[in-house]
Amino acid sequence: MPEPARGLNSRVQKLRLQSLNTAPEISMERAILVTEAYRKYEGAVSVPVLRALTFKHVLENKAICINDGELIVGERGPAPQATPTYPELCCHSLADLQVINDRPKISFAVSAQARQVQQEVIIPYWQGKSMRDRIFSSMSQEWLDCYNAGIFTEFMEQRAPGHTVAGDKIYKQGMLEIQEQIRAVMGRLDFKNDPSAPAKKEQLQAMLICAEAIIHYARRHADKAREMAAAESSRQRKEELEQIARVCERVPAYAPRNFWEALQYYWFVHLGVIIELNTWDSFCPGRLDQHLYPFYREGIENGSLTKELAREMLQCFWIKFNNQPAPPKVGITLQESATYTDFCNINVGGLTAEGSDGVNEVSYLLLDVIDEMRLLQPSTNIQVSRVTPDSFIRRAGEIIRKGWGQPSVFNADAVVQELLNQGKSLVDARCGGTSGCVETGAFGKESYVLTGYFNLPKILEITLHRGVDPRTGKQLGPVTDDPRQCQNFDQLMKAFERQLNHFIDIKIAGNDIIEKLYAETMPAPFLSLIIDDCIERGQDYNAGGARYNTNYIQGVGIGSITDSLAAIKYHLYEQRRFTWDQLLEALRDNFDGAEEMRQFLINKTPRYGNDDDFADELMQEVFGLFYKAVNGRKTVRGGVYRINMLPTTCHVYFGSVIGAMPDGRKAGLPLSEGISPVQGADRKGPTAVIKSAAKMKHLLTGGTLLNLKFTPKLLEGEKGLNSLVALIRAYFELDGHHVQFNVVNKETLIDAQKHPERYRDLIVRVAGYSDYFNNLNEQLQNEIIARTEHAVF
Amino acid sequence: MVTGTIFNIQRYSLHDGPGIRTTVFLKGCPLQCWWCHNPEGISLSRELIWHRHKCLGCGACVRACPRKALCFTQANLSYDQEKCDFCMRCVEECPAEAVEVAGQIMTPLEVMAEVEKDRIFFKQSGGGVTISGGEPLAQPQFLLALLKLFRSEGIHTAVDTSGYGRWHDLEQVSRLTDLFLYDLKLMDDSLSRKYTGKSNDLILENLRKLARNHNNIQIRVPLIPGVNDDAENLRAIGQFMRSLGISKMSIHPYHHFGSAKYEKLGRHYKLPHLKPPAAEDVARARGYLERQGIMIIN
């Protein structure tokens, strides 16, 4: 059983344990309601209105759940951890449900009744019609071949394009006011001169329906709370329930007036977004301390709020996130993101719209809450700018060194520059932040869709085999130069570049089709209410309605490919110790009988992560080629492509499809994660890792992920804390984007692997998020154990 | 240009002075402390180290040696010190990093190039460079050249010394050093002779002189159970410090992480069964000293 956390009152304690001890299960409620709505409306109304009426039907009919003792109300499913499915996106087969139920990790209980509903109601309607089915049947053979080869993944094959974060709009406007705004835009539609006016009208009509639906949904909570209050014997709880009823009558219809209403408003919006579609990643309140501070300040000043009450409200709010695991994934999508975490990532600190220090009392309060709650969700990060006080970083450092992976640390100044490089306004950039794992976005104003991971080392493997995937023998890429004929290293890099561009082209061609499918058949009119400028443009979030539209392709394995290229360049072209024939033969045989060569490649190669320019320049070269291949290309929604460098758990999956590599890695083993060095390759300590990583042009990306593993001793005492602050400051002075810390002894991890029952509480940093060590599969556990541990010298 | 022999340059050192530091370890030490955890730093000359647990047993090193100085017998690598001229061929040819040469000859500029890499971390943390050993005073010209260079680059300098060296050298060093980390081990001269191989006269005398012309000296005491952790010795150290007007000290409890190195170097370790002091023993020692007005800074 998870241990009770200290410092929580009995209400929060109880809610926390309920959240932690309830096993995730599949709820068919949403699937049934969505299917009913589609049966009723599909074909009779426009697509946006169909989606809006579906949303309304779900919210009108889903069970209302108010948990005992809670102050912030509303569940996505009928109860905590009861997780809906999204058959319009992914219609699970009965075999899928069996796997989801049976798998040892990231499982969801599937009842016999749920299975029956799936078989009798859901599958007959959705099979062949779900987005997943339509995507796979629309893809070219070469796309399918590449997908199956593990060259890239596809985020939208069972999840909708989400990845956006709420701005400050909802704290200023109620839904009734937003409806007025919609009507005003409708009134201005120019049916004479604008050929898209009818489509805009449908979209705006859909938004109106959704706004109405969420108000109604909140009022259903008010009714339920009153009903419960009437039957409640405890006077205190009766009063609380009556207060909940008043809050739910007020928001989201009207703008929030106080701290409680602000939190509850956001939570209804959150539920709306994740009930409407299964957005990847989960929605998030973003700059929560900035949004809440005016309410906090006013409440303290007028005496209606105390710090303790604010803390308790936030704790109750925290639990709501943890009650909603990421909806079940299957297939490759599960492998690339094997976690219950839904990637809500709250930003604390950073800059104000005017560019001054954004740290306020709520920022510190949020850090306290993170510390006390110790929950996977919501994840949290601190945004550190040059003007952020050391005291704030130190407070975060005290939590970081407890070793459960939160908060992660971002460079607010770099985030602003990244956004400015992408053409955003200065104010939009300063009000932005990072979400998901490490992704930069203009909060409230941008749709920044991650489209899939891209397997950089696999491209090298294919290059070494002249376009053939050695795993299957299929010719996937162009027939480039035989490496054995490459007179110099540059000639090899030319071949690599050709292969890289070829596969990026295939990925983007597939993205274009998928993006169009979502724009035309899967609009998100509720989400469009929240993100500017969907209303003004009369355009859906999924069709380019946001002020900024960005698509990402995420590069994986930069450490592995850098070390492999360094090995080739150093040993084959400079030292001439080995020949191509020797190397290719060793790779083919998975280094069987070539252990000496393998050791040489591992130990005698200049490797990334040691502040060695020989290797680091190769990292820069690969990064540059990837950037050139992707950055600036046009998207269907009228935006552009960008790159970022993060893996979630995809470095494990991508490694599983690659044979032995010239960096000495044996077939099937995980790749390096994020922009971290290959596990164990960094030998000169954390400052050298930071220097190497900082040689990447972070400001050209939309996010990079660096993991540093420390022993607890290294962060002990004042000295440890001060050094942590200095490491962060130095990395950020060099324009690094993000760094996260894993603070746990290798021995602890090994023991936890042997005795999982003793470590049910052990949370570790994975890649841009934390997870229970027990939730990770063995490969990922081993990968984390193998990361170089920086110890005290 | 003067060169020196260095056996390690350690980045991200947190316990050799303020902030994040790079510690440069100079080879060679006149003392022979029983507990020394850097035995590869004792000899002034370079030495071959063989890491048995990394060795693949492939014999690449033996084949690579142009002077036939290496020999593999009964799964043991030995080398003939007379023949070896440290050409490094064996190190280069070993695939597994099982053969290592302790000691690299470097110029001050080469050392600077390595130290320079972490300058941004020094700046952010108030750190700098620490020169340790071995005993830095065993290579006085090189030490002075290093310190001059660091000074000219505006890098904070610390010197970690046993105090066993010529005053003439130490005096010059003191003008280029921001912080001294000065070891005091045993106040009783006969015990000093026994456990460190040398009388403590020179060490104490140098400290007396140093205290007169340098105002940033911290004393370091390695706490060796049964050797120097008795009340008498600790009190004597405290009294001596007070008499010189030095108040700061760090205590370094004995550990045996260095013991494995002795075997690799083919040396005998004199304290194979000694256990690190218990936390309460460290606290007790701390108490003795604090009661005398000594400020323990770690």
Image (cartoon, coloured by chain):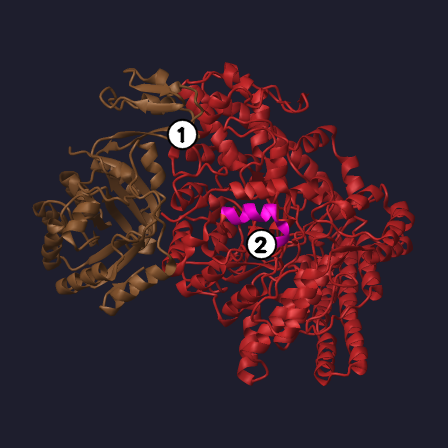
Chain colours: A red, B brown
Rendering coords of residue A407 (x, y %): 52, 58
**Which quadrant holds the C terminus of chain B?**
bottom left
> What residue is pinned by disc 1?
B52
Rendering coords of residue A367 (x, y %): 52, 65
Look at the image and give the residue range highlighted in magenta: A746-758
Looking at the rendered structure, the secondary structure element under dot 1 is helix
* Numbered label attached to residue A763: 2
Residue A784's place in the image compared with A409, above or below, is: above
Chain under label 2? A
State whether the magenta stretch is mostly helix, strand or loop.
helix
Is disc 2 surrounded by few (<14), some (14 to 19) or many (20+) residues within 10 Å? many
**Which quadrant holds the N terminus of chain B?**
top left
Looking at the rendered structure, the secondary structure element under dot 2 is strand
Outermost residue, left side: B168
Badges 2 and 1, same chain: no
Q: Amino acid at mark 2?
A: Ile
* Numbered label attached to residue B6: none
| Residue drawn at (22%, 68%) of the image | B292
Q: Amino acid at mark 1?
A: Arg
